[in-house]
Amino acid sequence: MKARQLIPPALAMAAIVLVSNLLVQFPLNAWLTWGAFSYPVAYLVTDVCNRVAGPQLARRVAWLGFATGLVCSALLAPPRIAVASGSAFIVSQLLDVAVFNRLRKLSWWKAPLLGSVAASVVDTAIFFSLAFAGSKFPWLHLAAGDLGVKLVMAVALLPPYRALVARLTRP
């Protein structure tokens, strides 16, 4: 595996984690934070890597994105948010890779959609319970809204997924 193949998606992943950790602190309304709109792009990165280069690269990108994102988040976000985000991120990303890989031979859209849906449910449960349980923050409403956005984004990101895969696999 060449570094040039690994570095761009790993940096994209780290940026997504950092931006999402910052944006999750700002509610849009009683049901959503701004982070709900940025975080689902992480599954797009993982799924494109998985389709183009396989699950080994996708897992490496997830781990590098996790490490970079966690360090940056620890510097810029409250510790509880950084730990919750890192835990939810790596568990859900590895789940996305596993589900995607298991379904990769089905129709082009099934692996990224079902992998993202499964990962989104797990990510939401882990992140919101670790980040906000026991606090006065209205996290149950936010978790429901966040999951709803992630599910909509899983569908909305299918056309960019298909376009990126087509571009990256062109001879």
Image (tube, rainbow, N blue to C red):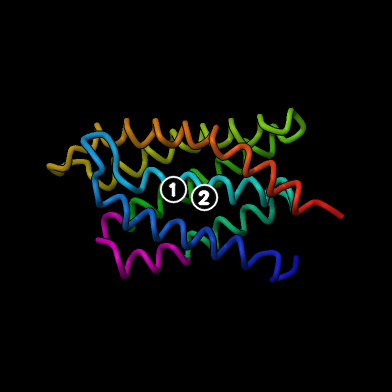
In the rendered image, residue 77, in percent from the top left (x then y), is placed at 28, 62
Secondary structure found at label 2: helix
The prevailing secondary structure element of the residues shown in magenta is helix
Residue at 26% from the left image edge and 34% from the top image edge: 31
Task: Say above or below: 16 vs 11.
Answer: above
Residue at 54% from the left image edge and 61% from the top image edge: 12
In the rendered image, residue 49, in percent from the top left (x then y), is placed at 67, 52
Q: Which residue is mark 2?
A: 42
In the rendered image, residue 126, in percent from the top left (x then y), is placed at 36, 41
Q: The disc labelled 1 sits on which kind of residue?
A: Tyr
Task: Say above or below: 67 vs 55.
Answer: below
Most distant residue in the right direction: 171
Task: Say above or below: 75 vs 171.
Answer: below
Give the quadrant of residue 69. bottom left
Res 116 label:
none
Question: Is residue 34 found inside the magenta-colored segment of the image?
Answer: no
Q: Are marks 2 and 1 in contact (CB under 8 Å)?
A: yes
Q: Quadrant of the C terminus?
A: bottom right
> Which of the two residues, 35 or 79, is positioned nearer the viewer here?
35
Please give the range of residues in magenta: 68-81
Q: Quadrant of the N terminus?
A: bottom right
Task: Say above or below: 137 vs 148.
Answer: below
In the rendered image, residue 76, in percent from the top left (x then y), is placed at 30, 67
Secondary structure found at label 1: loop
Question: Is residue 73 found inside the magenta-colored segment of the image?
Answer: yes
Q: Specify few, some or many for label 2: CA neighbours under 10 Å numbering under 14, 14-19, or 20 or more.
A: many
Residue at 40% from the left image edge and 61% from the top image edge: 18
Q: Specify few, some or many for label 1: CA neighbours under 10 Å numbering under 14, 14-19, or 20 or more.
A: many
Residue at 74% from the left image edge and 50% from the top image edge: 52
Q: The disc labelled 2 sits on which kind of residue?
A: Ala
Q: Which residue is mark 1?
A: 39
